[in-house]
Amino acid sequence: MRLSRFFLPVMRETPAEASIVSHQLMLRAGMIRQEAAGIYAWLPLGFRVLKKIEQIVREEQNRAGAIELLMPTLQSADLWRESGRYDDYGQEMLRIIDRHERDLLYGPTNEEMITEIFRAYCRSYKDLPKNLYHIQWKFRDEIRPRFGIMRGREFLMKDNYSFDLDEAAARASYNRMFAAYLNTFARMGLKSIPMRADTGPIGGDLSHEFIILAETGESQVYCHSDLVDMAAPGPDIDWDGDLQPLVDARTSLYAATDEMHDEAAFNAIPEDKRLSARGIEVGHIFYFGTKYSEPMKAVVTHPDGQERPMHMGSYGVGVSRLLGAIIEASHDEKGCIWPRAVSPFDVGVVNLKTGDAETDAACESAYEQLSNAGLEPLYDDTSERAGAKLATMELIGLPNALVIGPRGLKDGVVELRDRKTGAVENLSLESAVNALIEGRTAAVSETA
Ligand code: 5CA
C-alpha cells in the first residue's frame, strides 16, 4: 500500500478525551473514530488489525473443533421471553420496536438464538457433541462506556456455544475452549491468566475469565505469580483426548477476580508469590448446564430412549477489546509496537526524499520486491518532511521500517529499523530486503 493512496489520519497531539494509552494511541494513529458514546467507526488501519485478530481467533476455534456460522445482530424479544431473560437483562439491552409493533432487540449475546437453532435440527444423542461459533457485533447499553473500544457499547465478540449429552461431556468441551483460549492469546503476544470469575447474567456456576495484566485494567485480580509466565499448551495437543490435566495445572494455583476473591485462600500462597494487580478481561468461558435448554425445551434422546435437556456452555472473546489490550501490553512513548502476527502491515518503507530520482527508484524496487515476496509493506511516498514520516511510522508501530535516503544510498546503504528493540542496521538494499523476507518466514513458523 502506498501511503499517498491510503487513508491514515494521524494526530500529533494527545486527544484530551482519552485517559488510557491504548485509547490515545488508537485515536492518534487514525485507527478509530467515535461516532456516538461507545460506538466507533473502524478506520482502515484499525480495521486491518481487527481483521488479523479475528482471523487468529477463527483459526484457533477451528483447530479446537468449533464450527463457524453467522447469526443476525437483531433478535426477536419472544426468544428471550422463552428463557426468561427478556425482563431480567435490564437496561443494558437495547430494545427496538419495528413497524408492526413487534419487539426486537440488538443482541448482547446469543444463548437463546443458538438454542433455538440447535433444537430445531438436533434431537438425538448421535448429533452431539457440537460447538458452534460466530464473530458478530454485539450491543450492550453500558452505563459507562469508556476507554475507547475497551468498554464500548457496540463491540465485536467471538461467541460460541457447546451442546453435550451430559455434564462430563460438557466439561470436555469446556476444557477444549480453555486450551484454545490460551493458544489464541499467546499467538497475539499476550500472557493470559485464567481466573475463577462471577457468571453474571449468563449464569451457571463454573466459569473462568482470561485476564491480561495491565495497570489500566478495569478488574482487580489476585493470583499466584507462577501463572504469569506459564506457557500456552500449543497447537499440537490431542484435542479429542483428556485435557483435564492441562486445565488442572493452571487452575490448581490460586487465581480469581475481585467478585470471587477469597482472602484466606490468597493468604495461603507464599508471600513472595502473591500477586494483586489490575487486569483486562479478554475472554470469558461458562458452563451453565441446562439453564437455557430446559426452559427452551432443547432436548435430545439418549441411548436409553429418554429425552433430556442438553448440557451447554458458552465462550466469549472480546475481539475488538483485544486491540486495546494488545496496545496496553505493547507500546512506548512514541507509539504502538505491534506483535508481527497482528500488525496492520508487515513493514514500512520510508522515502526520506520523495522526488529524488535515485531514492524514489530504490524505494520502488524495495516496495516491489517485498510485495512480490508476499509481504504487506506500507510505502510512505508522500512529500512530508523526513522527521514527520519517521514519527508516523513509530506511532503506527509496524515491526520494521526500511528507511531509504540519498545520503545512505551514496554509501550504498539503507537503514533497517526494528520498532521493538530500536536497533538500526545499515545494510545494502538487497541485504535489507532479504532480511525482511527471511524474517517474515521465521515469524510465520514461530506463530503458525
Ligand atoms: N455469552 C457469553 C459468552 S459467549 C458472554 O457474553 N460473555 S461475556 O459477557 O463475558 O462477554 C465476552 C467477552 O466480550 C468479554 O470477556 C469481553 O472481552 C468482551 N466484552 C464484554 N463487554 C464488552 C464491552 N462493553 N466492550 C468490549 N468488549 C466487551
Image (cartoon, helix red, strand yellow):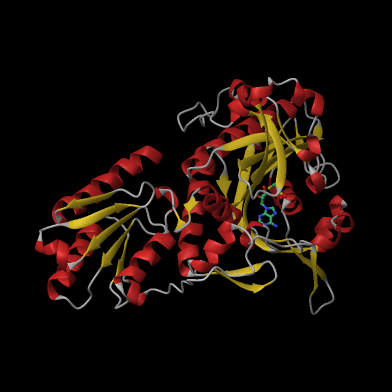
Q: x, y (%) of residue 390?
A: 34, 65
Left or right: 309 in relation to 321: right
Residue 448 at least partly seen: no
Q: On the image, which quarter does residue 448 sit in?
A: top left
Q: Quadrant of the N terminus?
A: bottom left
Q: On the image, which quarter does residue 42 sit in?
A: bottom right
Left or right: 371 in relation to 312: left
Q: x, y (%) of residue 154?
A: 67, 64
Residue drawn at (85%, 50%) of the image: 83
Residue 398 at least partly seen: yes
Q: How many marks?
A: 0
Compare residues 433 and 291 and report the one nearer the observer.
Answer: 433
Left or right: 231 in relation to 159: left
Left or right: 88 in relation to 394: right
Compare residues 223 and 308 and report the one nearer the observer.
Answer: 223
Q: x, y (%) of residue 160?
A: 64, 46
Q: x, y (%) of residue 273?
A: 64, 24
Residue drawn at (68%, 58%) of the image: 151
Q: On the image, which quarter does residue 297 sit in?
A: top right
Compared with residue 419, is residue 223 higher up or lower down, i.e. above or below?
above
